Amino acid sequence: MKKLSLNVDHVATLREARKGSFPDPVAAALIAEQWGADSITTHLREDRRHIQDRDVEMISKLIQTSLNLEMAATEEMLKIAYSIRPKMVTLVPEKREEITTEGGLDLILAKDHLTQFVKNLHSSNIKVSLFIDPDIDMIKVAHKINADIIELHTGSYANAISDQDKYKELLKIIDSAKTASRLGMRVHVGHGINYHNVAELAQIDEIEEFAIGHSIISQAVFVGLPQAVKEMKSAINSKTK
Ligand code: PXP
């Protein structure tokens, strides 16, 4: 059974629009796991534009499943990871001006820094996932850096307009997933995955987990969070052959 990690950042975005106390991403996390989410993802950004430190602390204390703490590879975040002790950390690139995470990590540029960073997290028994583009060279470097998991950035696949481009992007994801799995790393995917484009990804055996936020929270506006989570959990497990 493939796993679903619900990213609750988008609930916090709605709360921060009024700088108030609702909707609460902590409540969303608790409801989502009751309706089939296998873990909860939060991206604690340097600028704290959506998820706040309090959200991460409470979610990590209250959920029955596990927390995937998404963060940049900075000293500030390392200290937070040491104190929260999530089951897993996903390292992502972060730019202040971006609307959401754009592109995967440049593992080649940051290889030495990331190798040490992964080692530090491992010393606290935290599994490490690297968010990277579906590119075979990056997968090989991720393996050298000692990543436990890679999360393949599915943004280009999700944004492709023509069938031809979509297929080209899908092939990159398939190749990358197979290579990573052969090298002994677990494979997750995330970014821009929705109820329409998930079916093709659900066919890829090597993918263990889907990290999805925006489409599920958007669907929840119309059908409620329990139904939105159930629909996606069933979609990611809709292998046709
Ligand atoms: N995975 C990572 C690493 C992300 O940065 C994001 C966006 O916050 C997601 C998954 C979820 O993407 P979306 O909100 O488009 O489903």
Image (cartoon, rainbow, N blue to C red):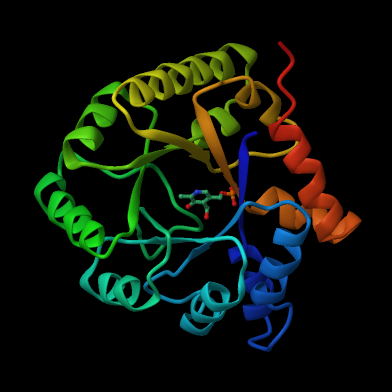
Residue at x 53% of width, y 34% of height: 208
x and y percentages locating residue 19 in the rendered image: 63, 87
Confirm whether residue 121 shows in the render. Answer: yes
Does residue 204 sit above or below 209 in this rendering?
A: above
Does residue 240 sit above or below 115 in this rendering?
A: above
x and y percentages locating residue 50 in the rendered image: 55, 73
Residue at x 35% of width, y 26% of height: 180
Quadrant occupied by the C terminus = top right
Residue at x 14% of width, y 44% of height: 111
x and y percentages locating residue 166 in the rendered image: 58, 19
Residue at the left extreme?
Answer: 112
Residue at the right extreme?
Answer: 223
Q: Which of these two is toward me, 106 or 199?
A: 199
Rendering quarter of residue 76:
bottom left
Rendering quarter of residue 199:
top right
Q: Which of these two is toward me, 89 or 165?
A: 89
